[in-house]
């Protein structure tokens, strides 16, 4: 464990404030062999994509494969058990990638702005930067970011605009449902592109082994309370959000409810991500099964209100 603190001493701190709870859950499950390496790598890839862990262009893996030293499981286990801090874990992973001890495929690696990024052009390349999305209305908004002082500020400006645009797009394609002070927005068969990768939500997909997956993405907004409103999902077995097929309640395999709760202030909103799929622990002892002949609903049972939200599910390739 002493090596972790040496790593922290030599490298700056990563941004621990934005780490979702499901990444820590993944680390714990991976350290105890409940999920495979790729599931853990997906969490690391998310941290890089969101800029929580920064890795320069020169340290990207040229291959498309991922490799993790076996002993890294110890570090993941220590973090999941709160034996080391979140910053210690993030800086350890960041160090391992930068030094080439741990490899993450190049297509998902972000940049710390020390080198030109494959995702973020320099300010002098502003014309090409704002023409990459293919959406004219969004591209026009992104033009204003090119006057920022340095590439990091340009990236932060573009990120804020893209997040606001994504929010508005999701709302415009959604049906809204009011549950007490919270408005839930649901867009069936939702797709969004992140750095050239198309991600799909609110539909049914299957793994290579035939496991059905329901990756649900909802938008929740506090539209009816001047105080804080708390939504709860502490674990699959203790969660106020379950899928109902008319005769059976399906508990989730994982969620991004940080510390088990999402708290929204007045007017605040946040996307909620919940996965139904393989039974990987923490109360989920059965795989999710999908039957095209059945109707499925998201059963919300919060102290502030209840609702069976109809899920218009389709199977995607």
Image (cartoon, rainbow, N blue to C red):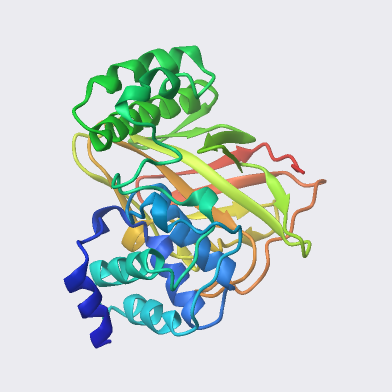
Q: Residue furthest right?
A: 293
Q: Quadrant of residue 154?
A: top left
Picture layout, residue 172 above or below residue 285: above
Give the x, y percent position of residue 54. 33, 54
- Camera-side residue: 103 or 268? 103
Task: Work out whether 293 lies above or below 65.
Answer: above
Is any part of residue 227 visible from this angle?
yes
x and y percent of residue 116 in the render?
37, 40
Q: Can residue 83 be seen in the rendering of this structure?
A: no
> Which residue corresponds to the image point at 44% horizontal and 53% vertical from the top-left?
46
Residue 238, above or below 148: below
Q: Is residue 299 left or right of residue 246?
A: left
Q: Residue 48 vs residue 280: left or right?
A: left
Residue occupying image coordinates x 47% and y 25%: 171
Q: Position of residue 217 (x, y in %)?
A: 52, 43
Q: x, y (%) of residue 174?
A: 53, 27
Where residue 164 sits, quadrant-wise, is top left
Point 21% across, 79% down: residue: 6
Q: Nearer the viewer, residue 98 or 279?
A: 98
In this rendering, position of residue 178 left or right of residue 197: left
Q: Quadrant of the C terminus?
A: top right
Quadrant placement of the N terminus = bottom left
Q: How many marks?
A: 0
Res 189 quadrant in image: top right
Observer-nearest of 281 and 227 = 281
């Amino acid at each position: 464990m002493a090596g972790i603190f040496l790593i922290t001493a030599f490298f700056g701190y990563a941004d621990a404030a934005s780490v979702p709870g499901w990444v820590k859950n993944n680390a714990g499950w991976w350290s105890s062999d409940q999920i495979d390496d790729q599931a853990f790598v997906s969490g690391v890839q998310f941290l890089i994509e969101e800029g929580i862990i920064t890795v320069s262009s020169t340290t990207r893996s040229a291959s498309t494969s991922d490799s993790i030293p076996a002993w890294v499981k110890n570090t993941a286990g220590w973090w999941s058990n709160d034996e080391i801090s979140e910053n210690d874990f993030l800086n350890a992973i960041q160090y391992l990638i930068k030094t080439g001890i741990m490899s993450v495929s190049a297509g998902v690696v972000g940049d710390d702005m020390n080198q030109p990024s494959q995702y973020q052009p320099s300010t002098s390349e502003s014309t090409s930067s704002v023409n990459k999305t293919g959406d004219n209305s969004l591209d026009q908004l992104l033009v204003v970011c090119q006057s920022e002082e340095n590439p990091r500020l340009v990236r932060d400006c573009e990120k804020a605009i893209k997040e606001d645009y994504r929010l508005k797009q999701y709302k415009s394609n959604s049906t809204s449902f009011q549950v007490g002070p919270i408005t839930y927005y649901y867009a069936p068969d939702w797709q969004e592109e992140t750095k050239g990768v198309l991600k799909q939500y609110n539909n049914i997909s299957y793994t290579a082994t035939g496991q059905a997956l329901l990756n649900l993405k909802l938008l929740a907004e506090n539209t009816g309370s001047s105080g804080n409103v708390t939504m709860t999902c502490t674990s699959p077995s203790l969660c106020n959000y379950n899928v109902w097929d008319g005769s059976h309640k399906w508990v989730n395999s994982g969620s991004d409810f940080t510390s088990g709760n999402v708290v929204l202030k007045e007017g605040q909103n946040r996307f909620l991500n919940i996965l139904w799929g393989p039974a990987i622990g923490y109360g989920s002892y059965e795989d999710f099964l999908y039957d095209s002949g059945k109707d499925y609903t998201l059963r919300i049972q919060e102290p502030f209100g209840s609702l069976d939200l109809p899920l218009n599910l389709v199977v995607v390739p």
